[in-house]
């Protein structure tokens, strides 16, 4: 409200003062505009007073460019309008995809590494002091740090070691003798595949970037290699060498398999020969026993006159039967003193 004095008719002040409301003496439309402007100003001041912090962010309260305080708890806060400003720092897990880069292994072979980084802000104040609270500045710094760590790691490893450590696991073949075989000339071995845990490429790289959190207020959660590749001009040579190595390995396996097969064949032939020899020996022993028994029976038969006549009769019939084989019409002429003729004369 404004104050004004009263004056006499000749222009002298009376010493009395009166108060006047804002917009007094103004038309109604002008007063409405004035109140609307005042309301907008009030809303702007209130809007610059309250700070809303979400779950996935930090709020940095600055006064003349200097960070006065950090708001990390979600909710509503208050700041001094027009004097204090607010910067937003992300709190969630962020993804940064590094551009593919060339690195050289310890055996002087070039490889193309394509990787990505998961990172987050852990100390917003230090993040603001060292990187101005900028995500792009942080990604540029992460790019340099991860690239140098990757280059240093791979430069100390051979190309084969880099490929093997890609997933942190290595499959090996373990050869063990078969426990079920005993007292056998053939030594049979069984091969089993075992997975051995080794230090992965990610672990090697992460070991070199542990200082990032202390220095910049950020944490690199993981560095993962999406793709390991070779330059186009080296692929054909590498593929040719790999094919040659695989052919050599296949030839070695084939030779070992043929050697094992020949051992199995020789051992089987030997066992078969031994089995046949033993069987033949047993057969001959059985035949010998049968012949001995036969001779014993004959001896017993001929030692008894009654049995001797019967066996002589039977053997004479067998002889006559054998002599009649070969033709349907055959005449046998026997002398009177022939053992066979003695059958018909009743000599037996």
Image: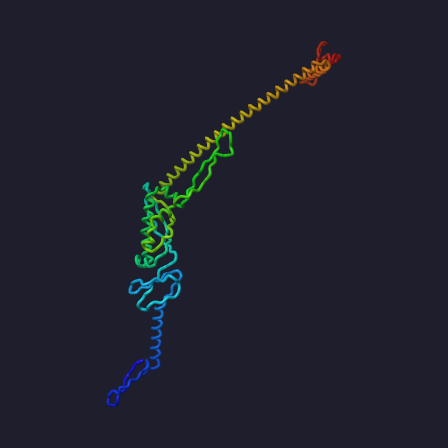
Q: Please state, as top left, top right, bottom left or bottom right, where the C terminus lies in the image.
A: top right
Whether residue 333 can be seen here: no
Residue occupying the point 44% across, 34% down: 253
Q: Please state, as top left, top right, bottom left or bottom right, where the N terminus lies in the image.
A: bottom left
Residue occupying the point 37% across, 42% down: 161
Q: Position of residue 2 (x, y in %)?
A: 30, 81
Q: How many marks?
A: 0
Q: Position of residue 32 (x, y in %)?
A: 35, 78
Whether residue 156 can be seen here: yes
Q: Quadrant of residue 341?
A: top right
User: Residue lying farthest bottom?
Assistant: 9
- In the depicted view, which residue is nearer to us: 317 or 17? 17
Q: Quadrant of residue 49?
A: bottom left
Residue occupying the point 65% across, 19% down: 293
Horizontal side of residue 87 vs 197, given as left or right: left
Above or below: residue 256 compared with residue 3: above
User: Residue lying farthest right?
Assistant: 346
Above or below: residue 57 compared with residue 305: below
Horizontal side of residue 312 vs 4, given as left or right: right
Above or below: residue 233 compared with residue 6: above
Q: Position of residue 145 (x, y in %)?
A: 32, 51
Q: Position of residue 195 (x, y in %)?
A: 44, 42
- In the depicted view, which residue is nearer to us: 113 or 72? 72
Figure coloring: rainbow
Q: Quadrant of residue 91?
A: bottom left
Above or below: residue 266 compared with residue 120: above
- In the depicted view, which residue is nearer to us: 188 or 109? 188
């Amino acid at each position: 409200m404004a104050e004004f004095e009263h004056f006499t008719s000749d222009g002298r002040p009376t010493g009395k003062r009166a108060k006047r409301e804002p917009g007094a003496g103004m038309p109604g439309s002008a007063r409405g505009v004035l109140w609307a402007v005042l309301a907008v100003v009030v809303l702007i001041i209130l809007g610059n007073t309250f700070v809303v912090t979400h779950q996935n962010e930090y709020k940095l309260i600055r006064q003349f460019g200097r960070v006065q305080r950090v708001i990390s708890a979600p909710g509503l806060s208050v700041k001094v309008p027009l004097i204090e400003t607010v910067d937003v720092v992300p709190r969630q897990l962020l993804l940064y995809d590094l551009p593919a880069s060339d690195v050289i292994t310890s055996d002087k072979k070039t490889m193309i590494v394509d990787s990505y980084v998961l990172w987050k802000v852990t100390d917003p104040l230090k993040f603001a002091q060292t990187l101005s609270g900028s995500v792009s500045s942080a990604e540029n710094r992460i790019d340099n740090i991860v690239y140098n760590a990757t280059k240093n790691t791979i430069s100390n490893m051979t190309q084969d070691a880099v490929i093997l450590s890609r997933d942190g696991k290595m499959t090996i073949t373990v050869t063990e003798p078969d426990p079920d075989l005993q007292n056998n000339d053939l030594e049979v071995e069984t091969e089993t595949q075992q997975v051995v845990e080794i230090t992965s490429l990610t672990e090697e790289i992460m070991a070199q970037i542990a200082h990032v959190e202390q220095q910049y207020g950020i944490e690199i959660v993981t560095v993962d290699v999406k793709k390991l590749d070779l330059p186009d001009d080296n692929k054909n040579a590498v593929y040719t060498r790999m094919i040659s190595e695989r052919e050599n390995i296949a030839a070695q396996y084939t030779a070992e398999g043929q050697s094992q097969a020949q051992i199995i064949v020789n051992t089987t032939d030997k066992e078969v020969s031994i089995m046949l020899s033993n069987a033949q020996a047993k057969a001959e022993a059985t035949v010998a026993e049968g012949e001995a028994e036969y001779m014993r029976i004959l001896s017993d038969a001929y030692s008894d006159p009654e049995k001797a006549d019967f066996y002589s009769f039977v053997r004479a019939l067998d002889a006559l039967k054998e002599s009649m084989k070969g033709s349907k019409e055959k005449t046998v002429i026997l002398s009177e003193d022939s053992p066979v003729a003695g059958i018909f004369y009743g000599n037996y």
